[in-house]
């Protein structure tokens, strides 16, 4: 019984981040913009919120829509489903391979965008995982840390020059949007006191996996704040969005019991509803490094903005930049 209540408490924390009323009573607007002539890409777009966001975007008629997916076969199936659901032009939607557990795959994806896209109006970096076991990628990093934070930040930096160039167009207001989570605000993050935060998080003897998802999503907030300060972010809207607690396959690695599953399905939003938050963040003007929740600009938890919180953010950012420069020297020109 104790395990049931522990799992339920974690589910409620994950679901609401302390804001139950926001989740239960929020009314999310459906966008009606005309995206003709514009190009958008979404990572993690063959399932869940990413797929739902792609469906929403397709209904707004962008000239080019790119699905960044780890499994191209599944991506092609998602493409056909989007076309069937929206009537979107088959020639205007593309499936590109992207494995966020590989820095080299991230670099190849960004290089493809640079070489083949004339403009990029929106990059929705949505791919993420919530793992239940300690797994190390081929690059030597714990999987959630790399997929949710290190690779996401790297991809954002590699795409930033194209977004910056697009911003010079008179008809453009490019967005770089990362999918965060309200889970970031109940992260314990004891590793922040270590001399090297990332290396400590990457050591199973010095770090725990239980709060890894929330820490990795906290890092998304840090990343957008720091990217928004860069010179090449001028003219680019950079933000992080909390999509709300949604019933999707994000939790597929966790074997919650029937009672917890019941709660999930009764209080969770559909992926289609949660994805409206991504569309808001990717289409509306927001302040630099803004945090978006329930289709509104929100103030993050106060401890992320105080002196200590900002110092931890600075340290994490500099450690990440060091990692990124080691695997993608070209970002030196960006940071």
Image (spheres, helix red, strand yellow):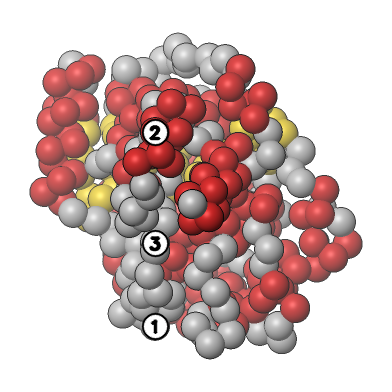
Helix, strand or loop at label 2? It is: helix
Q: CA distance from mark 1 to mark 2?
A: 37 Å
Q: Quadrant of residue 269?
A: top left
Q: CA distance from mark 3 to mark 1?
A: 16 Å
Q: Position of residue 22 (x, y in %)?
A: 65, 26
Name the side, left or right, on which 290 lies relative to 74. Answer: right
| Mark 2 / mark 3, whichever is N-terminal | 3
| Mark 3 / mark 1, whichever is N-terminal | 3
Please give the label number shown on residue 329: none
Q: For mark 2, what is the residue?
A: 262
Helix, strand or loop at label 3? It is: loop
Q: For mark 1, what is the residue?
A: 140
Q: Residues within 10 Å of mark 3 (few under 14, many from 20)?
A: some
Q: Quadrant of the C terminus?
A: bottom right
| Closer to viewer: mark 1 or mark 2 | 2
Look at 67% across and 76% down and name the residue there. 191
| Closer to viewer: mark 2 or mark 3 | 2
């Amino acid at each position: 019984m104790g395990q049931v209540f522990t799992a339920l408490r974690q589910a409620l924390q994950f679901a609401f981040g302390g804001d139950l009323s926001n989740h239960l009573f929020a009314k999310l607007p459906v966008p009606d913009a005309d995206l003709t002539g514009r190009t958008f890409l979404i990572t993690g777009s063959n399932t869940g919120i990413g797929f739902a966001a792609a469906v929403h975007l397709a209904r707004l008629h962008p000239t080019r829509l790119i699905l960044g997916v780890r499994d191209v076969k599944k991506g092609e199936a998602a493409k056909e489903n989007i076309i069937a659901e929206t009537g979107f032009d088959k020639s205007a939607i593309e499936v590109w391979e992207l494995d966020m557990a590989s820095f080299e795959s991230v670099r190849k994806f960004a290089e493809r965008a640079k070489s083949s896209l004339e403009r990029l109006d929106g990059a929705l970096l949505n791919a993420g995982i919530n793992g239940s076991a300690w797994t190390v990628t081929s690059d030597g990093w714990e999987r959630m840390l790399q997929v949710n934070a290190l690779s996401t930040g790297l991809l954002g930096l590699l795409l930033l020059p194209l977004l910056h160039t697009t911003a010079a167009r008179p008809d453009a207001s490019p967005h770089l949007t990362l999918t965060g989570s309200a889970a970031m605000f109940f992260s314990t993050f004891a590793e922040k006191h270590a001399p090297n935060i990332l290396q400590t998080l990457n050591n199973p003897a010095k770090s725990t996996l239980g709060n890894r998802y929330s820490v990795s999503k906290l890092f998304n907030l840090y990343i957008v704040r720091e990217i928004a300060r860069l010179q090449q972010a001028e003219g680019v809207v950079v933000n992080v969005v909390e999509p709300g607690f949604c019933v999707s396959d994000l939790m597929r690695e966790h074997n919650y019991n029937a009672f917890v599953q019941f709660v999930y399905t009764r209080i969770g939003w559909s992926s289609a509803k949660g994805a409206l938050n991504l569309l808001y963040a990717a289409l509306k003007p927001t302040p630099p490094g803004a945090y978006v929740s329930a289709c509104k600009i929100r103030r993050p938890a106060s401890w992320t903005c105080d002196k200590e919180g900002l110092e931890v953010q600075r340290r994490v950012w500099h450690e990440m930049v060091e990692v990124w420069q080691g695997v993608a020297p070209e970002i030196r020109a960006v940071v």
